[in-house]
Image (tube, grey):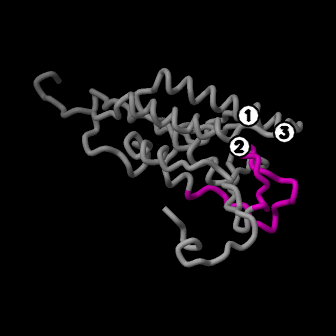
Amino acid sequence: MSDYNVEHSVPKEGPEQPRRRPDLSTFFSTLDLVDTSGDRQPQNTHSLPLPRDISAAFRNLANAFDMMRGGSGTSQEESHNDLLETLVESLMQSAEHPPTEVQGVPDEFIEQLDRVPKKSLRQDMSCPICSNPFLEDSHPLVVRLPCHKDHIFDLECIQPWLKLNPTCPLDRQVLVKKKAPPPPPDEEDGEYDDMYA
């Protein structure tokens, strides 16, 4: 299928920009099947996503992160590759032995992450996941995780990770505390029975 420029004989302006990240549409469509965080709770409280669907979500993200690897071998890219290799291994391990439900953060948590203004970004700053410089994008959407002031990521990179894992990819600190189950009702607080008094 041709694009607008070809159909209307409009010459392209400058070289075509390479994609900054792999397409994650397959991952997000799979995630819709298994995400039970926040407002996405199933109507039947006892229903669980299928293990094969959970495994597919982890595997799709691992494949996307694996596509981001590569490069010319500079020291910054080697540390980037180490992080990506660790993330891919973790995701593939979860794909091989899927949990009963996805432990990721709810959409509300992602929406409330601190946004980093473009003015505060430096030229040498880049996303730890995709290694693309933040300022290379004309409209960067950069977020800061609450675990550390220097843990900043492209939202497009960190969102898929957080939807599957409630941890920071750099220090593995848990970002969202799970609600404790309500305590069992105390049996002594029941109705008072005069027969046993």
Asked if the magenta segment contains residue 133, the reply would be yes
Asked which quadrant contains residue 56, the reply is top left
Which of the two residues, 75 or 155, is positioned nearer the viewer here? 75
Q: How far apart in space, not on screen, are marks 1 and 3 (Cα)?
A: 16 Å
Under circle 2, the secondary element is loop
Q: CA distance from mark 2 to mark 1?
A: 7 Å
Identify residue for label 2. 129
Say if 106 sits above or below 48 in the image.
below
Depth check, mark 1 against mark 3: the one in front is 3
Q: Which mark is residue 83?
A: 1
Confirm or deny contact between disc 3 and disc 2 (CB under 8 A).
no
Percent coordinates x, y for residue 71 in the rendering: 79, 40
Question: Are the residues flagged by discs 1 and 3 in contact, CB closer than 8 Å?
Answer: no
- Of mark 3 and mark 2, the one earlier in the sequence is 3
Q: Which stretch did the figure color magenta?
A: 111-136
Which amino acid type is marked by label 2?
Ile
Q: Are discs 2 and 1 less than 8 Å apart at CB?
A: yes
Residue corresponding to mark 3: 72
Q: Earlier in the sequence, mark 2 or mark 1?
A: 1
> In this rendering, would 15 be left or right of 87?
right
How far is the residue under mark 3 from the one under mark 2? Answer: 16 Å
